[in-house]
Structures are given as C-alpha cells and as structure tokens.
Amino acid sequence: MNNSIFFDHIRVDRYSSTPKYLQLAYAILSAIKEGKFQKDNVLPSLNELTNHLEISRETADRGYKYLRYLGILKAVPGKGHFISTVEVNTPGRICLLVNKISEEKSLFYHELVKLLGSNVPIDFYVYNNDFFLFKRLLNQRQDYSHYVILPHFFDNEEAAEALIDSLPKEKLILLDKRLKRLKGNHSTIYEDFEGDIYRALEQALPVLEKYHTLKLIFHRKSYLPIEIKRGFSKFCQQYAFERDILDKVDQVQLSKGEVYICVNDDDLVNLLDRISASSFSLGTDLGIISYNEAPLKKYIAGGITTISTDYKQMATLTSESIKENIEQQVALNFCLQLRASL
C-alpha cells in the first residue's frame, strides 16, 4: 500500500485526551472497517509513522503492538507489519465536548471512563464556552459512535444549536441543559435549573429562617441559564425573603442577616476573604451557599453548604445511553448539603 494513501486516512489529534497510541490503533481499525485498507497491505514503518504523524517511536510501537494483540496485524522480521485480517469489530468511539474543566466535570469524566471500560476510547475536549473553538473541534469529525456535549456558551447560542442540530440524532447525547431548537429524537440528561434551586432552598428553609435577605451572585455575562435567577426569585417571593441579584462579588456590602449564593467558585473565594477580614461570623451573622459539591468544601471555613447536580448519576445515565443505544430524556437529581456556612 502506498504510504500517501495510508496517511490520507490516519491522523492523531494532540488535543485529545485519548492516548496517541490508541488514536493510531483505532484510526487504522476504522480505515480497515471502511474498506480503505485491505488484507496483506504493508503498513508504514515506525520511523515513517514518527515523521508523518509527529508522534514518538514508542507511541507508534505501542499502537502496532495493540493491533497485534487484537490479531489485526502481523509482524514479519525484515519486512514490516501486514494487515492479517479485515474482519474487525471496532468498539464505539466517543467525542466528549465540555464547556470548561472543573472538579465536577472531572468526576463525571472519570466515572464515565470506569462505566464504559477501557476498550471504549473517549476523545475529551474543553472548548471554554467559546463557540468558535467548539465549531473548530466539532468540524474535526471522525468516525464517532456518539457525541456527548455540554452545551454552554457565552454567545452565538443559536449558531451553536444549529451546528449541534446537524449531528446525527441517534449519536447525540446532550448533558446539563435542553436545547429547544433541536429537531429529532436524541438523548438529553439535564438539570431543571429553575426547579432545582427552588427545591434546594426550600429544603434549607428551617436554617434560612434566621436570615432576612438572600443575594444571588450571578454575572451578567454568564453561560449559566437565566432559569437559576427565576427559581431564586420565585423562592424569595414565595417565602417572603428580601432578595437581590448581583453582577459581581465586589458589589456585596456585608450585612448581618444576609445569605450569599455563589454559582462561581472564584466568587466564593473572594467572598470568604472579605468575611474573614470582617467582624461577622459565618453561619451566625452571615450565610453562604455554593453551587457544585467538591471534597474541599466539606472543610473550608468549617464546611460550605452546597447545592449540586449528581454528576455520578449523569455518568451512569450517559453510559446507559451509549451501551444500550437508547434515547432518553431524564432530569438529574439535585442535592443539598447543609454545613456550618449556613
């Protein structure tokens, strides 16, 4: 086989979290499955792989060894590597696109890897809420069995939804939020942003009753859905709390009897710094609720109260959609962890 033909179909993505040797192996498997490579074709040498794909010799060797282990390649001393069979059963390959890296997203990723098993490669990309980066990553389409997407953007939301809508719906799994403009049947494993914050605050009501005002710190330029603000306002109206929605933590004027709800961890840290420099006592004079559970929040300032999506449940439902190839619409559980900060 001509090497130029081989490299027309084989690529290694340096931005992917999937090990490069597995990318090489699965690219070859996909090309064989598509009929691009034939039985007894000779593959490029390790040196040629290193030069053309810009990978190390060790990576190239591991990729070929993996294919020999699967029985796809055979090595003939002095002659190279040959395709020994075109009867291959390629496992699914997942494209996972998340808006930002965080502790809860890492928890989801590692749980998903565990549930799917090591034989299912996941190309894990972070697009930083940026539509243009998202578009560039998604346009590098390969032979993916599923696209798993957390669709949060600072702007260009309509263009992002149109791009997502162009994907095969049987391969699409949306996480965290529903996109109303999408057509066709696909899986969505989502948060009920408005209902979740309302119910979480309602659960915390016996503790909240010692305060008179709730303040939500919610940046004007945010990727988070405005339904959070609606659920917050609805709760305050229903239970007669004074309320305010602030764009920046700098706008907070510390006052006794107030609870501050931080959806952003940077705001949480800044607020804790200000409280520690004041004469107020956290959990007595002032309260804090933070979005998204993290191990350290159990210990910071004696324990930070959190409201959070169940990311392990998200991983379990996602793996079910992939392994059983089913379409489902499921609202995730939302958890309240009461601690000393309230």
Image (spheres, grey):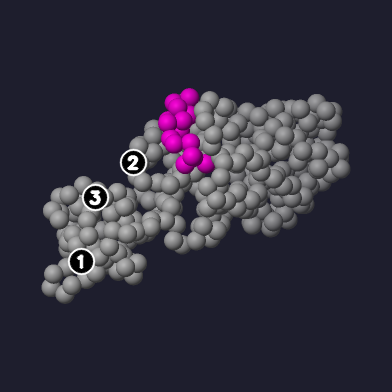
Is the stretch drawn in magenta largely helix, strand or loop? helix
59 up-or-down from 246: above or below: below
Dot 1 or dot 2: first in sequence order is 1
Residue 141 appears at what percent x and percent y? 35, 41
Residue 168 showing in the rendered view: yes
Of residue 229 and residue 76, the one placed in the foreground of this image is 76
Residue 307 shows in this picture: no
Q: Residue at x 86, y 39 (%)?
A: 209
Between residues 232 and 181, which one lies in front from this camera angle?
A: 181
Q: Which residue is mark 1?
A: 81
Q: Amino acid at mark 1?
A: His
Residue 166 on the magenta segment: yes
Give SS at disc 2.
loop
Distance from disc 1 to disc 2, alpha carbons, whole Å, reads 28 Å
Position of the N terminus by quadrant? bottom left
Which residue carries the number 2 mark?
Answer: 140
On whether residue 29 falls in the magenta region, the answer is no
Residue for badge 3: 36
Q: Are marks 1 and 3 in contact (CB under 8 Å)?
A: no
Quarter residue 18 falls in: bottom left
Give me the C-alpha separation between circle 3 and circle 2. Answer: 19 Å
Q: Position of residue 131 (x, y in %)?
A: 43, 32
Mark 1 neighbour density, 10 Å: few (under 14) some (14–19) many (20 or more): many
Left or right, 185 with respect to 64, comes to right
Q: Which residues are magenta?
A: 158-173
Q: For the residue marked with disc 2, what is the amino acid?
A: Gln
Classify 10 Å Cα crowding around label 2: few (below 14), some (14-19), many (20 and above). Answer: few
